[in-house]
């Protein structure tokens, strides 16, 4: 009888792993811990199912005389804005860990520096079970960003302003980068929900304010939003010039 109970317990664990963890590279104990952390710390905003439908009614922002709703991330579609990987690809574990640890400035996503390393890794593994993309697709490879010495120089900034105009960044972000361009009221995300263009003059960028982080934003794009990747439409040098001009807008 005792052996039968032990066998049933083992089968239960294996079944749970197959239903939730199979193909995601994490053991059942890690996923269970991740689920516990998620429901305790994340579900209020992101929903019990991780679909972005939680109870966070405080996620609003006043701008341009209007009230904009900022939607929590829907993990079930496997689309992430803040990545070091190419547009359309999954982020790295390091990308997710950085967002979880540091939070997202100018949003309702707080830092989770109080969580242990094991808890952070576990909740990341659990998040991967919420979308089939993590099981079906290869993980993205990080894009390196080696900043040239001339980034931020007057000459580079001047060239960056020309790029800003030629690429029509001003149509969404405005002539002075205040997020008040002529198309700013009509932008929608992939779910057809209104989205607010970024105001660079505030100076706190969601993925970080270093030149390298700004470059990655222009190179990878922000998947799920109206912000495209310029990796194919703009050469590397011009992207760095655009970084120089962006840094000027942030001063």
Image (cartoon, grey):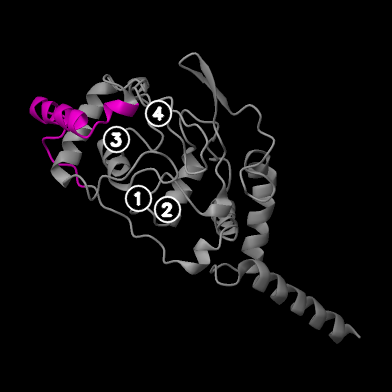
Percent from the top left, x then y, of residue 85? 35, 53
Tag shown at residue 94: 2
Q: Nearer the viewer, mark 1 or mark 3?
A: 1
Secondary-structure class at tag 2: helix
Q: Is residue 65 above or below residue 83?
A: above
Question: In whole angstroms, how far apart are the C-alphas of marks 2 and 3?
Answer: 17 Å
Q: Please give left or right for residue 86 compared with residue 78 in the image.
A: left
Q: Residue at 67% of width from left, 51% of height from top?
A: 49
Q: Please give left or right for residue 34 compared with residue 165 in the image.
A: right
Name the N-terminal-most of marks 2 and 4.
2
Q: Count the marks: how many? A: 4
Percent from the top left, x then y, of residue 222? 39, 43
Name the N-terminal-most of marks 1 and 3.
1
Q: Which residues are magenta?
A: 146-172
Percent from the top left, x then y, of residue 225? 43, 40
Name the N-terminal-most of marks 2 and 3.
2
Q: Residue furthest right?
A: 1
Secondary-structure class at tag 3: loop
Q: Quadrant of residue 221?
A: top left
Image quadrant where one finds the C terminus: top left
Tag shown at residue 197: 4
Report which residue position mark 3 lands on. Answer: 210
Name the N-terminal-most of marks 2 and 1.
1
* Marks 2 and 4 close (CB-CB < 8 Å): no
Q: Nearer the viewer, mark 2 or mark 4?
A: 4
Q: Nearer the viewer, mark 4 or mark 3?
A: 4
* Marks 2 and 3 close (CB-CB < 8 Å): no
Question: In whole angstroms, how far apart are the C-alphas of marks 1 and 3?
Answer: 14 Å
* Marks 2 and 1 close (CB-CB < 8 Å): yes
Q: Quadrant of residue 139?
A: bottom left
Q: Quick one: label 3, few (<14), some, or many (20+) residues within 10 Å?
A: few
């Amino acid at each position: 009888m005792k052996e039968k109970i032990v066998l049933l317990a083992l089968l239960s664990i294996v079944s749970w792993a197959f239903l939730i963890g199979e193909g995601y590279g994490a053991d059942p104990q890690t996923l269970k811990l991740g689920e516990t952390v998620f429901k305790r710390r994340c579900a209020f905003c992101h929903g019990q199912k991780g679909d972005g439908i939680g109870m966070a009614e405080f996620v609003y922002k006043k701008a341009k005389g209007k009230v904009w709703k900022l939607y929590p991330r829907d993990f079930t579609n496997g689309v992430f804005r803040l990545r070091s990987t190419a547009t359309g690809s999954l982020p790295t574990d390091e990308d997710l860990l950085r967002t979880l640890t540091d939070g997202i400035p100018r949003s309702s996503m707080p830092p989770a520096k109080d969580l242990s390393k094991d808890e952070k890794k576990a909740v990341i593994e659990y998040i991967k079970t919420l979308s089939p993309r993590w099981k079906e697709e290869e993980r993205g490879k990080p894009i390196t960003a080696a900043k040239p010495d001339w980034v931020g120089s007057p000459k580079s900034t001047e060239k960056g302003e020309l790029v800003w105009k030629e690429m029509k960044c001003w149509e969404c972000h405005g002539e002075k980068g205040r997020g008040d361009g002529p198309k700013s009221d009509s932008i929608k995300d992939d779910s057809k929900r209104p989205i607010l263009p970024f105001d660079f003059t505030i100076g706190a960028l969601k993925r970080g304010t270093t030149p390298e982080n700004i470059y990655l934003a222009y190179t990878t794009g922000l998947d799920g939003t109206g912000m495209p990747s310029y990796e194919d439409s703009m050469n590397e040098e011009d992207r760095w010039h655009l970084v120089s001009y962006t840094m000027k807008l942030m001063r």
